[in-house]
Image (cartoon, rainbow, N blue to C red):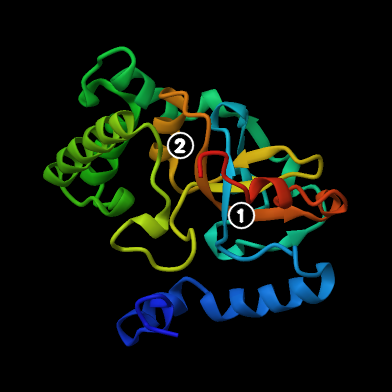
Amino acid sequence: MTLSRHPTLHPRNWRRAIEAHVPRKAARDWLNRLRFGPDAPQSDECIYVDPCRVHHQFLGKASRFDLGRQASGRVLAGDWDKARGDIEANMKLQSCRMRWQQGAKWEDTPIHARHRAEIAAGKAPDGMRSLDDLDARAAALDAIFEETRARGRLLAQHELPDMFRREAGGVLIHIGRDGTLLRAGGGAHRFAIARILELTEMPAQLGVVHALAMAENPLIALRKSRLT
């Protein structure tokens, strides 16, 4: 076992591993295998979904549920998956459509306006602390969009130089009780790129799986890429 293949074990990544709840996730994986066997959900694992068949966004932060990346691989009962809304109502997706489908300037999009206001208020949305940071982020998104269009697919985390653990950092997708896919926080722009380009498949980071969905275990199909 080499550190290059397991970056979470590298000393320079220990702090990041703690912040990403990797020890807790490893324990969760072990317990999941005891409960559900070898096909159990794994934290941060990569699944493959059709972005055009994701019709809902998870609205957990607007309710009593807050299930972010730290909950990846968790099997959870209850009504959390009912906190959902229309994916097309998402501000980032709407802004990306304005930019890449309608040719609008980033400055004229609602997400850009919100970020400008947040920066002016002393906040750092997505780590951006200045208007220069905002402009650099916009240019980077344009570059990723064009690269993805030319490539015809979205890269998985293991194909990126800063890969950390499985698909950690990818587009976060929860699975509801009936197998419904819910886009959660994380990777919103990459999801928008895949949806706007009408890609047939994109890699995603597994989020939370509803306990009722495990009767059919949708992960068996979602783990298989149709492109490779």
Amino acid type, label 2: Phe
Q: Is residue 12 above or below residue 226?
A: below
Relative depth, front residue between 14 and 61: 14
Horizontal and vertical percent position of residue 105: 21, 20
Give the residue at x 43% y 51%.
Answer: 156
Relative depth, front residue between 50 and 113: 50
Q: Is residue 19 above or below residue 71?
A: below
The residue beneath circle 1 is 207
Give the residue at x 26% y 35%.
Answer: 147
Q: How many marks?
A: 2
- Circle 1 sits in a helix, a strand or a loop, which is it? strand
Q: Quadrant of the N terminus?
A: bottom left
Q: Residues within 10 Å of mark 2 (few under 14, many from 20)?
A: many
Q: Is residue 126 left or right of residue 94?
A: left
Residue 6 can be seen, yes or no? yes
Horizontal and vertical percent position of residue 203: 50, 46
Horizontal and vertical percent position of residue 218: 75, 47
Q: Is residue 150 left or right of residue 18?
A: left
Amino acid type, label 1: Gly
**Residue 163 found in image quarter:** bottom left
**Residue 66 found in image quarter:** bottom right
Q: Residues within 10 Å of mark 1 (few under 14, many from 20)?
A: many
Q: CA distance from mark 1 to mark 2?
A: 15 Å
Horizontal and vertical percent position of residue 164: 40, 68
The residue beneath circle 2 is 191
